[in-house]
Amino acid sequence: MDIGYARVSTGDQTLDLQLDALARAGCGRVFTETASGAKADRPALAEALAYLWKGDALVVWRLDRLGRSLGHLIATVGELQERGIGFRSLTEQIDTATPGGKLVFHVFEALAEFERDLIRERTNAGLAAARARGRKGGRPRALADPKRLALARALHEGGETDVATICKTLGISRATLYRHLKARPTPDA
């Protein structure tokens, strides 16, 4: 059985165009939703996916109605294929039950993998360039400034200021304070 899924992003938009197309396509049931495509939590989509059985097909008016991104779209269609469920997009005329539809999704998968590899490459190149300029990655150290560390030690050793107040004043956690207090003081501190 063909199961339809229709989505609009805002309440101002109407589902009519999608519903008409899904009805013409012969969908036995249609799940509808008003939610941004960027939202991960789409209850009607989850309900539609749970409703599908082996041999069924999920039908959408356009690809962008289903996936938040190319990666999400490929993952969703891949999960459907693993369950023996087909996928059809009416506007793009993609049907994963046909060899041409399968080919299109294999091309999409290759493009998504290529995009991930490019992102990884650019990230690594950027990190290498930053290291070459003397920058280190990660979060800045909370008590890297010797004056702030000396202040923390003085307040703690003075005994008049409690740990919570020291941490709040310096904007650090208890663990950070105790870690630095346990470390040996540097000669210039």
Image (spheres, rainbow, N blue to C red):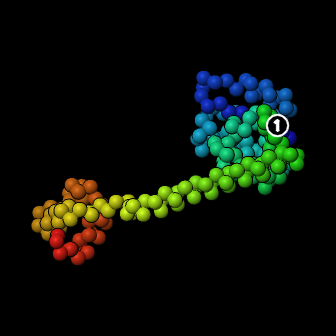
Residue 140 screen position, x and y as percent: 34, 60
Residue 97 screen position, x and y as percent: 86, 46
Going by the numbered disc 1, the residue's amino acid type is: Gln
Residue 36 screen position, x and y as percent: 60, 35
Would residue 54 appear left or right of 141 to someone viewing this image? right
Q: Residue at x 68, y 51 (%)?
A: 112
Would residue 126 appear left or right of 95 to someone viewing this image? left
Q: Quadrant of the C terminus?
A: bottom left
Q: Is residue 153 above or below residue 76?
A: below
Quickly name the residue at label 1. Answer: 93
Q: Nearer the viewer, residue 174 or 114?
A: 114
Label 1 neighbour load within 10 Å: few <14, some 14-19, many 20+? few
Q: Residue at x 29, y 70 (%)?
A: 179
Q: Nearer the viewer, residue 144 or 24?
A: 144
For residue 160, say whether it is visible: yes
Would residue 146 appear left or right of 16 to someone viewing this image? left
Q: Residue at x 26, y 63 (%)?
A: 143
Q: Residue at x 23, y 57 (%)?
A: 170
Tell me which corner region of the image, top left, top right, bottom left or bottom right, holds residue 150. Answer: bottom left
Q: Nearer the viewer, residue 142 or 5?
A: 142
Residue 153 screen position, x and y as percent: 17, 67
Tell me which corner region of the image, top left, top right, bottom left or bottom right, holds residue 23. Answer: top right
Tell me which corner region of the image, top left, top right, bottom left or bottom right, holds residue 122. Answer: bottom right
Q: In the structure shown, which secondary structural element does the residue marked by tag 1 occupy?
A: loop
Q: Quadrant of the N terminus?
A: top right
Q: Is residue 100 above or below residue 137?
A: above
Q: How many marks?
A: 1
For residue 174, say whether it is visible: no
